[in-house]
Amino acid sequence: MRKKIEVESKSEDERETRPSKGFSREVVVQDFLNLPSFAEARVIAGVAGLDSSVRSVAVLEMAMPDKDRQAQMLQAMGDFSSCDEGTVFALIERVVSWQAAALVLKRNAFGQIPIERLVQMAEETGLVVIELPSKSDWILVCLECSDYLSASESVVGVQATGGRVLEQFRSDTDLQSIADTLSNALGTSLTIESADYRLLAHGAHESAIDSSREQTILTRRSPKLLVDRFEREHIFDVMRQTGRPIRVKEIPEIGFMQRVVCAIRAGREVIGYIWVLENNRRLNRTDMIILERAAAAAALSIVRGQATAERDENLKKDFVDEVLSGNVRSREELQSQAARLRCDLATFHQVLLADADDFRQYSERPVGEDGTETPFPRRRLLDIISAEVSKFSPGSLTVGRGKDVAALLSSDTRTPLPKLKSVVRRIVESIHSALQCELPGLSVSIGIGDYYADVTDLAESYREAQQAVRVAQRVYGGGRALFFDELGVYRLLGYLKDQQDLEKLRHPALERLKEYDCKENTEFLRTLEVFLENVGHPKAMAEQLCIHRNTLQYRLERIEAIAGASLSNAEDRLNLQIGLKLHKLLSP
């Protein structure tokens, strides 16, 4: 069984460790020079000590206790560049007094302090000093050294603190495992979030938590109040620019305890964040190393997840596109696609379509104190609708189609249609409620096509959903949901698929009224609409138009004269009413 070695770091919070004992075969300093991370290493002092045995690897920082450090390879990873010459030399004297096997440091680790004195002291005591390039990654160096000692079968007793945690991240492939490992190692609660502040995983701990964390877990994303404040104060900009974890002080008024945050990076792109609560103690340097390693493991997990999600999203979109287009090549192929998506083809019976009414206006509105504009959140709109649909209709498939979002609603064929319609109404209410909270000010119209028993007929349900959205936007001004079976006369107009066919049905009398209104600045078309909505109630008509009843009578007489129709004739009224509905449907 493979043994694990300690990668120890001591700082403000000291941890006791037991020195390693007993070796069946000695590992010497020279052995480490053959490792990949030492490919560009340079022995600058103590060549005669290259055959000194090494029993463990430790990380050297400023706050080291006077303790036996014999037979250790000390790695000076602390920032010593700001130390004065006396402090650095005192530190080196202590290293020499420990009779350590070797000291590994980065080039220019001690800033402007001449290295000659260090070399002289090392040569006098036989201490091996190895210099690595300044670009070296200490975490990888420590792990490689530890791996070598572990694999050599020479370790009988080993130390185990930070190294065990760093090793664990190698086997943790999913974000929740990484969060659990990190939370246990640091002894505090934490969250792993995406670049758009969605909760991806969280590590639970017995330590106290604040209201911001509670809300993040409950809503699966960082509170908007917190995100807006951090954006205003450019805290996220700092996090994106720095390559190291940073500390964010508490904000009591919004229930935010002090945290350390580390950006998760894929190359230069920030793809997420790890937020660690500091309510029990202040994280030390070892903790920061572990946090950075966790961020690297999380980056790999997120990138892998994104690749998988992108592949699945493309498969889903291709499947939905084929169903909605009606160009199904064969049921067998459709069944095969459904199997790859792990969904049941027999459960899809209805289409829901959502369309942002004013996405251009929404995307151009300034937000924040700096007046910056927010882009139209297409992905966020898709995520919200997908989440709400899945709550009430598990197994549904939701995809983005331009600025629209289409969902194949999944349902049990044994469920009565009235009950299914009730479920869809709850979905619509939930979507509008979520949008009001998450994307306030964005108006979205929703159309729901009829129920069909066979999936190959869903292209018709999609066309009906499109018609319902069109009526919701052009007739009712948007921001509402309509079922196709409730459209009344607009259902008939919807069967005219060719726009030119619809144009041919424009009522000439209405066109004359529209032309007259534009020329004379009158409101005869609006007056006619109110009349047809309130036939037999002249008082209600006058009140709605805010005019005197005598003025109303005059307008109606003029309308009859211009339109060439009699408002007392039921057939003329019906033709004008249908013409008005068509006029609204064709209006841009």
Image (tube, rainbow, N blue to C red):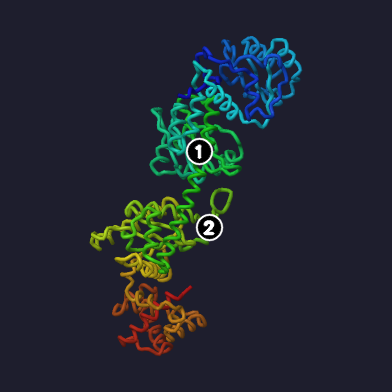
What secondary structure is found at the residue carrying circle 1? helix
Residue at left 32%, top 67%?
450
What secondary structure is found at the residue carrying circle 2? helix
Give residue 45's position: percent from left, percent from top. 72, 17
Mark in the foreground, 2 or 1? 1
Residue at left 33%, top 56%?
344
- Circle 2 is placed at which residue position? 363
- Tag 1: amino acid: Ala
**Image quadrant in which you'd find residue 141:** top right
Q: Is residue 448 left or right of residue 498?
A: left
Q: Which of the two discs, 2 and 1, labels the residue nearer the N terminus?
A: 1
Give residue 539's position: percent from left, percent from top. 32, 76
**Image quadrant in which you'd find residue 430:** bottom left
| Quadrant showing the N terminus | top left
- Tag 2: amino acid: Ser
Give residue 339's position: percent from left, percent from top. 37, 55
Residue at left 43%, top 70%?
474
Q: Is residue 289 above or below residue 264?
A: above
